Amino acid sequence: MTSAIKKFSPYIHFSREDWAFLRNATPLTLSEEELAELRGINEHVSLNEVTQVYLPLARLLHLYIDEVKKLYEATHVFLNTTACKVPFIIGIAGSVAVGKSTTARIIQALLERGPGNLSVDLITTDGFLYPNRILIERELMDRKGFPESYDLNRLIQFLSDVKSGRPKVTAPVYSHLVYDIVPGETVKVCQPDVLILEGLNVLQSPSSKGTERHPQVVVSDFFDFSIYVDAKEEHIRNWYEERFQTLRVTAFRQSNAFFYRYSALSKQEAHQVALDIWDRINGVNLHANIAPTRNRADLILRKGRDHSVQSVSLRKL
């Protein structure tokens, strides 16, 4: 009995080669130039990786989207009601610097170019961070990205409105340059076929604050499919430093950049600062809040040292 329990896994595990076989005949619709625009800083996603990893995933998502649409239609037939257009919502989680945004953009592009000419919107949870003035008041500036730094009520309301089929829903906008919410600026979500929500903590489970009479609603309650982008912490930490070093000589040099002060650092000084930020903030958040949600995902993309996906785990139905 004990050995049987140890062998049990809620996932089917695939090597990259085995997963690539599931692409079937899904066509590659991205060029090298188009892929270059989707890559994040210091990431090196190749067309070969898109072919082997993301095309099978796009095929799987199209199958899920079609089946969920049929389920909604069947439910409305049963209830004798008129069906409104309800987006299929994909959640993408993972650490800072692991490559969530690139993954989200590639999935968005492939779904838009695939069967059905789907409309796909991409929203990041950064827009639902509290403004800096509130974080400062609450002494949370060094915990930006931790669960308590987000306006979860606003995020839950946004997802509820989207999933209710409202014709137009707005989300706030975050600027990484100024490191704050952009006052008065919003992005519209107008009943897309698919909504991708990307963020650090989107797979968080309910806290103990919920009760039987008042259960807590969480972000993942609205997901039709979820993905966790995973890697060893030592690799993510290195990627974070590499990104910090690149930003030091690019975006940080803009006079209106929040981190302009870091642009004057030497490479060695930047190395120490980046590792300090990781050890005090991002690494702590990863251990306490992000990594524990990994096994709540429907699919896990596991990356190797070179940032490429090496294996895929798909949750059993």
Image: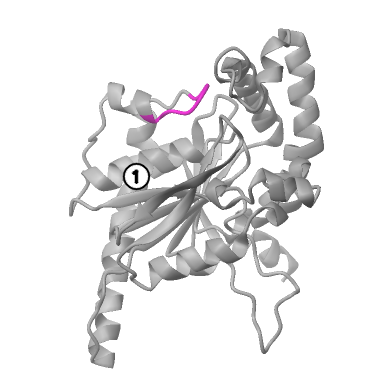
Residue 60, horizontal then vertical, whole percent: 34, 54
Give the number of callouts: 1
Q: Residue at x 29, y 21 (%)?
A: 33
Q: Residue furthest top?
A: 266
Q: Residue furthest front?
A: 184
Residue 123, horizontal then vertical, whole percent: 44, 49
Q: Residue at x 52, y 69 (%)?
A: 221
Q: Look at the magenta stretch and give its main secondary structure.
A: loop
In this rendering, does residue 305 appear at all? yes
Q: Quadrant of residue 177?
A: top right
Q: Is residue 22 above or below residue 266?
A: below
Q: Is residue 48 magenta?
A: no
Q: Looking at numbered disc 1 in the image, what kind of residue is underneath it?
A: Gln
Q: Is residue 126 above or below residue 193?
A: above
* Crowd around label 1: few <14 · some 14–19 · many ≥20 (10 Å): many
Q: Is residue 162 above or below residue 262?
A: below
Residue 267, horizontal then vertical, whole percent: 71, 9
**For residue 207, side relative to residue 227 (left or right):** right
Quadrant where the N terminus sits is bottom right
**For residue 31, side relative to residue 247 (left or right):** left
Residue tagged 1: 108
Q: Is residue 41 magenta?
A: yes
Give the magenta-colored segment's residue range: 38-43
Name the element at disc 1. helix
Residue 140, horizontal then vertical, whole percent: 77, 47
Q: Is residue 38 above or below residue 163?
A: above
Q: How was this image coloured?
A: one colour
In this rendering, does residue 20 appear at all? no
Q: Nearer the viewer, residue 139 or 244?
A: 139
Q: Residue at x 59, y 45 (%)?
A: 94
